[in-house]
């Protein structure tokens, strides 16, 4: 029962459309399904790390961390860097080279991990999930099943998004893909600019 409730809770993340979603979409479109799945895996591992941080550290300490200007500047720098790369990097065909393919998959994993971890909203969401879990369950087993359910729902839905995006690629011209990647780059960079603005506003 806790696992099923966790899945339902995890499905609520479908309403969030941000830099993580756009990074997943971009990698699946550019490099194929496996790249999208590796991005989703990077997001999953990042979520697990964030969950452990939120679970073992006090919520007020986490809130202080994610609201600190320096953290917002670091997150903004990461998102801006990815946004610029997505915007200016040309669309490339999938490489037949095993070494190049492996490098691309590793890049997809690291992008999923970093973009997710750099997003302060992810910490806020997991603080909420952790608080909700503690309000419903006292037993460690139930808590664990609940969190596994959330993580399972997030990973499965991200994987389905990757499959769907990669299936669309054959029907999109390179010029269309280039335009899509530029839009994604602007959206990711825009999130970084907004975080930087929040950081500067706190220092004023």
Image (tube, rainbow, N blue to C red):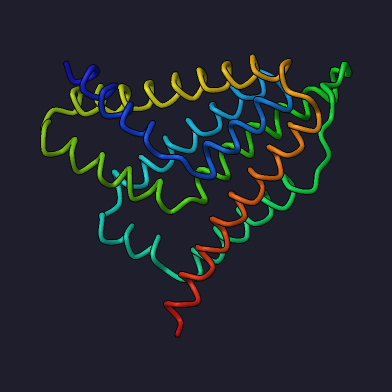
The residue sitting at 60% across, 31% down in the picture is 25
Residue at point 65%, 45% (across, down): 183
**Left or right: residue 176 compared with residue 122:** right
Q: In terms of depth relative to the viewer, which is nearer, 44 or 89?
A: 89
User: At which x and y percent is residue 12?
Assistant: 31, 31
The answer to whether residue 76 is above or below residue 170 is below
- Assign the N terminus to one quadrant of the image: top left
Drawn side of residue 52 relative to residue 165, left or right: left
Q: Position of residue 16 (x, y in %)?
A: 40, 39
Q: Which residue is drawn at the image coordinates 68% and 37% (left, top)? A: 180
Which quarter of the image is occupied by the C terminus? Answer: bottom left
Judge whether 165 appears above or below 24 on screen.
Answer: above
Up the image or down, 102 lies above or below 186; here it is above
Classify residue 170 by image quadrant. Answer: top right
Residue farthest toward the bottom in the current orientation of the protein? 204
The x and y percentages for residue 2 are 19, 20
Q: Residue visible at 45% across and 81% down?
A: 203
Closer to the camera in the image, 49 or 165: 165
Q: Quadrant of residue 24?
A: top right
The answer to whether 181 appears left or right of 187 in the picture is: right
Q: What percent of the width, then of the height, locates residue 37?
A: 59, 21
């Amino acid at each position: 029962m806790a696992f099923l409730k966790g899945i339902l809770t995890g499905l609520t993340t479908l309403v969030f459309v941000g830099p993580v979603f756009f990074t997943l979409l971009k990698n699946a479109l550019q490099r194929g399904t496996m790249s999208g799945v590796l991005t989703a895996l990077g997001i999953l591992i990042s979520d697990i790390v964030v969950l452990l941080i939120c679970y073992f550290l006090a919520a007020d300490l986490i809130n202080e961390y994610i609201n600190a200007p320096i953290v917002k500047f670091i997150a903004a720098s990461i998102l801006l860097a990815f946004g610029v790369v997505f915007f200016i990097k040309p669309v490339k065909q999938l490489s037949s080279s095993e070494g190049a393919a492996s490098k691309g998959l590793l890049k997809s994993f690291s992008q999923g991990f970093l973009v997710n971890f750099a997003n302060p909203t992810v910490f806020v969401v997991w603080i909420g999930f952790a608080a909700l879990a503690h309000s419903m369950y006292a037993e460690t087993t139930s808590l664990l099943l609940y969190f596994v359910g959330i993580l399972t729902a997030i990973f499965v839905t991200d994987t389905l998004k990757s499959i769907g995006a990669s299936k669309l690629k054959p029907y999109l011209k390179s010029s269309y893909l280039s335009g899509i990647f530029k839009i994604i780059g602007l959206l990711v960079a825009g999130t970084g600019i907004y975080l930087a603005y929040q950081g500067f506003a706190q220092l004023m």
